[in-house]
């Protein structure tokens, strides 16, 4: 909301100009990592890309094959509980501007629900507080 748009004079395509993009990506990554239920494939892909890693590089950190990462990201294979937490921990440790949240999030690992469910993120731009709906 309330962002500037840039419009192509030739084709009329409009794209948003998103201020403080790196900060926004860090806030979104933190919201995904703090999610109170298991990660899904789209979230794993987002975290991997946030870390600027290929599937092969990411797989080395979580001790699986790149094919396993691909199956997770495409929803063909369930992400196990241990892998879920390891993915979150790797993203926290290696992600830009996230290290300050390590203790808070790791202490919340036992509270991650077992049930996989759809969840929406609502982020307050001013306070960067996240609500899960």
Image: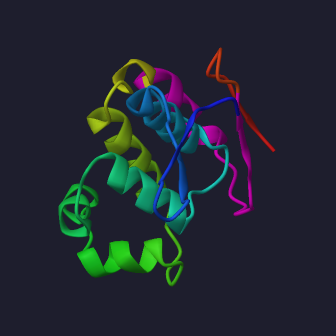
Q: Residue 9 magenta-drawn?
A: no
Judging depth in this view, the residue of 92 and 104 nearest the camera is: 92
Left or right? Give the position of 114 relative to 96. Answer: right
When the figure is inspected, residue 47 is found, relative to residue 98, above or below; the finding is below
Q: Residue at x 57, y 64 (%)?
A: 40
Q: Quadrant of residue 72?
A: bottom left
User: x and y percent of residue 100 in the render?
Assistant: 39, 18
Judging depth in this view, the residue of 131 and 116 nearest the camera is: 131
Q: Quadrant of residue 112?
A: top right
Q: Residue at x 27, y 70 (%)?
A: 64
Q: Which residues are magenta?
A: 102-123
Q: Quadrant of the C terminus?
A: top right
Left or right? Give the position of 101 relative to 132. Answer: left
Left or right? Give the position of 77 relative to 63. Answer: right
Q: Residue at x 68, y 58 (%)?
A: 114
Q: Residue 115 magenta-drawn?
A: yes
User: x and y percent of residue 58 in the render?
Assistant: 25, 59
Q: Quadrant of the N terminus?
A: top right
User: x and y percent of residue 2 in the render?
Assistant: 69, 29
How many numbered callouts? 0
């Amino acid at each position: 909301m309330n962002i500037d748009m840039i419009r192509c004079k030739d084709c009329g395509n409009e794209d948003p100009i998103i201020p403080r993009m790196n900060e926004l990506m860090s806030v979104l990554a933190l919201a995904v990592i703090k999610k109170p239920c298991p990660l899904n494939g789209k979230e794993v892909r987002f975290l991997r890309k946030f870390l600027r890693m290929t599937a092969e590089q990411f797989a080395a950190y979580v001790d699986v094959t790149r094919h396993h990462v691909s199956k997770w990201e495409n929803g063909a294979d369930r992400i196990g509980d241990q892998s879920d937490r390891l993915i979150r921990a790797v993203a926290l440790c290696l992600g830009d501007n996230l290290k300050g949240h390590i203790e808070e999030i790791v202490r919340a690992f036992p509270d991650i629900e077992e049930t996989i469910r759809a969840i929406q993120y609502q982020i307050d731009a001013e306070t960067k507080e996240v609500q899960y709906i």
